[in-house]
């Protein structure tokens, strides 16, 4: 956790440096346009961020007292240029070191228990946060877009979950209950935690998307351009597309989780579905994400509505892991507390 905390601090410093970089670039872009109207200065800033030349003052079509071209430029501008950051490289290195220590702790817990470490809430949290970090690092390697800025959100989430698990959920190694003594424990829980890892990344992207969309909505003022680190990040449309792709992968894995759970239930209790509280909430999560994908693909639900659906879906995942495990009784009451 200490190494994760160092990584979180480094990512946070990087965001602060991004804010300073965007402010400096905005100041440089506006230095020669102080005598121009505010709307034309914003158009120059947007064009500078996009790497294109700005139109001559007053040349755009006027709509409601503003240049239409300025509005379009502000909405679709590329991120403000942001150079290579040594702090960011340190943050990623600390994340990798924390992941290696986290992996070692999980493996040692499994060796001590002589089984996979997935039998109670502490072990679920230990494994689940490991998978969240693993998915984040893998996405950094696979996706062409630089998503290291998500490190603040990912390491922050992992720190909170690990802290809660260590303080409130820790239990000593105990034997497996009879219902968990099955190969389906490995299959079902591994796929479920993998899905949660992708949902967590999609959640982080959706949160940043909402922040970016709000910035874009007020980008017509010079102060909004200068003061936000969001000017160095991808636009809200790109963030939404990335979140959608990540959540689709999580949804596929969660679908298999639901199916594998039903098969396991038949092996353990002689029925595929019994409306147990955990089963119901697993299905609710599936419905939320299915609705998210369907609404975006067929109903045109994009922008903030799409982001809020993804956030609601991950909130349901956290509710299922915490509140359902702690306060609802049922066949899946394996909190260990």
Image (spheres, rainbow, N blue to C red):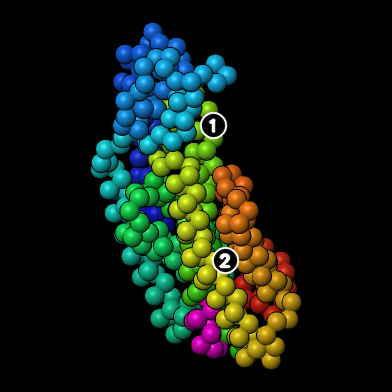
- Which quarter of the picture shows residue 20? top left
Magenta stretch: residue 184 in it?
yes
Observer-nearest residue: 73 or 245? 73
Observer-nearest residue: 72 or 289? 72
x and y, in percent, of residue 230 in the image: 43, 36
x and y, in percent, of residue 251 in the image: 54, 66
x and y, in percent, of residue 42 in the image: 43, 21
Q: Which residues are magenta?
A: 181-189
Quick check: 316 left or right of 5?
right
Give me the residue at 31% from left, 45% from top: 88
SS category of the residue bearing label 1: helix
Q: Main secondary structure of the magenta part?
A: helix
x and y, in percent, of residue 67 in the image: 48, 20
Q: Nearer the viewer, mark 1 or mark 2?
A: 1
Observer-nearest residue: 315 or 61? 61
Q: Which of the two labelled residues, at mark 1 and mark 2, occupies the earlier sequence position?
A: 2
Look at mark 2 in the image and give the residue it sits on. 169
Q: Quadrant of the C terminus?
A: bottom right
Q: Is residue 132 positioned above or below 40 on the image? A: below
Magenta stretch: residue 233 in it?
no
SS category of the residue bearing label 2: helix
Q: Residues within 10 Å of mark 1 (few under 14, many from 20)?
A: some
Give me the residue at 50% from left, 56% from top: 244
Observer-nearest residue: 107 or 13? 13
Look at mark 1 in the image and give the residue it sits on. 217
CA separation in Å, label 1 and label 2: 42 Å
Give me the residue at 53% from left, 85% from top: 184
Q: Is residue 248 positioned above or below 330 on the image? A: above
């Amino acid at each position: 956790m200490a190494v994760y905390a160092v990584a979180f601090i480094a990512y946070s410093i990087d965001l602060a440096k991004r804010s300073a970089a965007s402010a400096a670039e905005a100041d440089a872009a506006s230095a020669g346009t102080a005598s121009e109207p505010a709307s034309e200065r914003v158009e120059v800033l947007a064009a500078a961020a996009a790497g294109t030349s700005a139109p001559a003052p007053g040349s755009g079509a006027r709509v409601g007292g503003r240049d239409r071209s300025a509005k379009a430029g502000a909405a679709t501008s590329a991120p403000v240029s942001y150079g290579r950051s040594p702090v960011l490289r340190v943050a990623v290195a600390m994340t990798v070191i924390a992941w290696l220590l986290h992996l070692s702790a999980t493996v040692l817990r499994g060796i001590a228990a002589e089984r996979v470490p997935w039998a109670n809430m502490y072990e679920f949290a230990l494994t689940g946060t490991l998978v969240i970090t693993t998915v984040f690092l893998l996405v950094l390697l696979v996706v062409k877009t630089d998503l290291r800025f998500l490190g603040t959100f990912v390491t922050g989430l992992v720190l909170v979950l690990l802290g809660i698990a260590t303080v409130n959920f820790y239990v000593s190694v105990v034997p497996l209950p009879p219902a968990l003594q099955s190969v389906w424990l490995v299959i079902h829980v591994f796929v479920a935690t993998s899905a949660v890892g992708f949902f967590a990344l999609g959640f982080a992207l959706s949160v940043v998307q909402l922040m970016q969309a709000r910035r874009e909505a007020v980008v017509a003022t010079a102060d909004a351009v200068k003061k936000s680190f969001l000017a160095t990040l991808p636009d809200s449309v790109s963030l939404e597309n990335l979140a959608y792709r990540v959540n689709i992968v999580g949804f596929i894995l969660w679908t298999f989780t639901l199916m594998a759970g039903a098969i396991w239930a038949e092996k353990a209790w002689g029925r595929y579905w019994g409306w147990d509280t955990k089963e119901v909430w697993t299905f609710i999560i599936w419905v939320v994400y299915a609705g998210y994908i369907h609404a975006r693909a067929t109903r045109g639900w994009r922008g903030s509505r799409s982001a809020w659906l993804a956030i609601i879906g991950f909130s349901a995942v956290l509710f299922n892991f915490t509140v359902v495990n702690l306060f609802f009784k049922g066949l899946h009451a394996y909190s260990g507390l």
